[in-house]
Image (tube, rainbow, N blue to C red):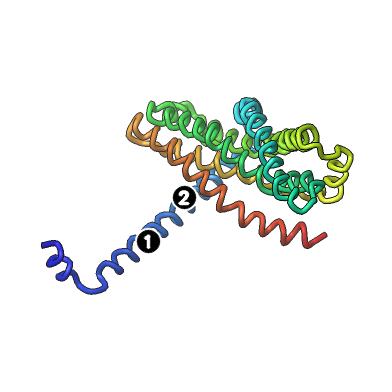
Amino acid sequence: MIQQRLEKVPQGWTIHRGVESIGKKLISGVTEMGKMSVFLYDAMRWLPRKPYRFKEIIVQIEFVGNQSVFIIGLASLFTGMVFALQIYSGFHMVKSEALVGPSVALAMFRELGPVLTGLIVAGRAGAAISAQIGTMRVTEQIDALEVMGINPKQFLVMPRIIASIIAMPLLVGIFDFVGNIGAYFVSVKLLQIDAALYLAKIGVFARPRDVAQSLIKGAFFGLIFSLIGTYRGYNTENGALGVGKSTNETVVLSSILILVSDYFLSALIKMFIYEGF
């Protein structure tokens, strides 16, 4: 019976529907990106206007940054330790143990530090931002702000985006530092690599521009998850169910965009920073 129904389907119909489905998803994605861009502009154009929300920005920096320090420090410590252990296994085969230090340092500065920090903070702060604003939307607190003459995007959205852009490079710096401390401990104390040689090789291969790349990526990833979190929360519907949906979408979409944008950021930085000097 199923085979007979499939035979009645016009040839090429399945392919047509598949292409149509992909096209609709692409159009929907581009439309959503356009809406988020307009949302970002509407929020950031309030930055130079009174009343200035410095206190709220400080509060959000404390929330995004200070409250993430412990988990970032713990994750970076063991990331550096396990990375050094695994790299040592490979370099030991060719008697190049002295390169463990710069390999870990460069990996931390260029990729592991900003990417893992972005994923961790997006899961913690990004989800919380979406839930906070989403709850305010479904409980009509945002409508109440508008009735009182307070612009919700200036009061709720802009401080969170600015705070994330400021806090993320600081968290990335902590991740890089603690991760390298963990790698140093494993390499020097456990694997018996000479400490002076370990540090000297890092000084030879690692450069300030590698640290700059890490901080630039951190700021950009902060913009990504804060924009998605505020946008999803601000447009939440359907009560508690909608808050949960917005929170989930924030984490998933932020993680995907961080990983995807990491490649393009790396390519641009390589083009303008590494080849320019």
Q: Position of residue 138 (x, y in %)?
A: 38, 30
Count of marks placed on residues: 2
Q: Amino acid at mark 1?
A: Ile
State the residue lying farthest toward the left: 1
**Image coordinates for residue 184, horizontal then vertical, percent:** 78, 36
Q: Is residue 174 above or below residue 115?
A: above
Q: Residue at x 15, y 65 (%)?
A: 3
Q: CA distance from mark 1 to mark 2?
A: 20 Å
Q: Please identify the quadrant where the N terminus is shown.
A: bottom left
How far from the left and from the top, in percent, is residue 231? 48, 41
- Using the rendered view, name the quadrant where residue 71 is placed: top right
Describe the element under mark 1 as helix, strand or loop.
helix
Residue that carries the numbered disc 1 in the rendered image: 22
Residue at left 50%, top 38%? 229
In the foreground, 35 or 252: 252
- Give residue 277's position: percent from left, percent from top: 83, 59
Which amino acid is tagged 2? Lys
Front residue of 35 and 232: 232
Which residue in the structure is indicated by mark 2? 35
Please give the name of the residue rendered at 82% of the width and 51% of the height, measured from the top-left corner: 205
Residue 34 visible, this angle: yes
**Badge 1: residue crowd in 10 Å (few <14, some 14–19, many ≥20):** few
Which label belongs to residue 2?
A: none
Which element carries disc 2, helix, strand or loop? helix
Q: Are marks 1 and 2 in contact (CB under 8 Å)?
A: no
Q: Is residue 89 left or right of residue 147?
A: right
Residues packed near mark 2 inside 10 Å, few (<14), some (14 to 19) or many (20 plus): few
Taking the image as drawn, is residue 56 in sight?
no
| N-term-proximal mark, 1 vs 2 | 1
Report which quarter residue 74 is drawn in.
top right
